[in-house]
């Protein structure tokens, strides 16, 4: 069983991932990897010597083709439990959750086959036990990011 938890901050060296919940012109932006038939939020692994903000910017550009965007961190998230990153049920991996408003795109040159721009959340998630929870936390922490939400 996977458990997703949220924190205001952790030690920087613990942050291994960046996930970027993205919109353009008020619509959600999702990615479809060439090897999968599901959709996901842009994001990925932090490279050696890279700041977590640089990871987020790089992953957003690589996975969506975004060339101009506003991006900001929301909170730290963690996933606890055995999965393809965590070897044991007690392992906990940490990442930084970001939101981005994408202004312009260019053609994709990565492992991403396509991006989906939509008014609604996708149903076929690559990580269904994680990504919907990240979006809900971003909605809770950033009321203005989701214009559809009632006060």
Image (cartoon, rainbow, N blue to C red):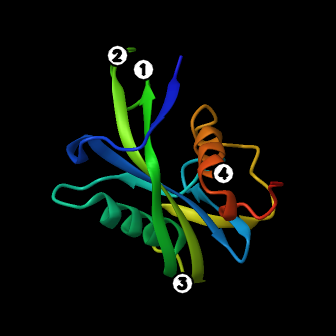
Residue 150 lies, in percent from the top left, at 83, 54
Residue 148 sits above or below residue 83 on the image:
below
Nearer to us: label 3 or label 2: 2
Disc with the residue nearer the chain's start (4 vs 3): 3
Instruction: Place residue 130 in its image quadrant.
Output: top right
Label 2 close to label 1 by CB (< 8 Å): yes
Residue in front for this viewpoint, 115 or 5: 5
N-terminal-most mark, 3 or 2: 2
* Sooner in the amino-acid sequence: mark 4 or mark 1: 1
Say above or below: 31 vs 65.
above
Q: Which numbered mark, 4 or 1, is in the foreground of this view? A: 4
Residue shown at 30% from the left, 41% from the top: 10
Which residue is label 3 attached to? 106
Query: What secondary structure is found at the residue carrying circle 3?
Result: loop
Bin the neighbour count of mark 4 within 10 Å (Cα to Cα): few under 14, some 14-19, many 20 and up: some
For residue 88, the mark is 2
Q: Give the mark, 3 or 1, whose residue is nearer the N terminus.
A: 1
Q: Name the residue carrying label 4.
A: 139
Q: Position of residue 33 (x, y in %)?
A: 55, 55
Residue 98 seen in this snapshot: yes
Report crowding for label 1: few under 14, some 14 to 19, many 20 or more residues within 10 A (C-alpha). some
Q: Secondary structure at mark 2?
A: loop
Query: Image quadrant for the C terminus?
Result: bottom right
Examine the rendering and report whether any part of residue 86 can be seen.
Answer: no
SS of the residue at dot 4? helix
For marks 2 and 4, the one nearer the N-term is: 2
Q: Which residue is mark 1?
A: 82
The CA span between labels 3 and 1 is 37 Å
Q: CA distance from mark 4 to mark 1?
A: 27 Å
106 lies left or right of 90: right
Q: Position of residue 116 (x, y in %)?
A: 69, 64
Label 2 and label 1: CA atoms lie apart by: 5 Å
């Amino acid at each position: 069983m996977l458990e997703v938890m949220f924190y205001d901050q952790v030690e920087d060296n613990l942050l291994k991932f960046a996930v970027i919940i993205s919109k353009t012109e008020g619509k959600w932006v999702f990615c479809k990897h060439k090897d999968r038939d599901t959709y996901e939020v842009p994001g990925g692994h932090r490279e050696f010597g890279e700041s977590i903000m640089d990871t987020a910017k790089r992953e957003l550009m690589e996975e969506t083709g975004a060339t101009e965007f506003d991006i900001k961190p929301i909170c730290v998230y963690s996933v606890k439990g055995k999965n393809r990153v965590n070897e044991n049920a007690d392992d906990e991996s940490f990442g930084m959750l970001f939101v981005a408003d994408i202004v312009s795109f260019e053609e994709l040159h990565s492992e991403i086959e396509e991006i989906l721009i939509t008014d609604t959340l996708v149903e076929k998630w690559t990580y269904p036990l994680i990504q919907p929870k990240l979006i809900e936390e971003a909605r809770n922490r950033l009321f203005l990011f989701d214009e559809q939400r009632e006060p």
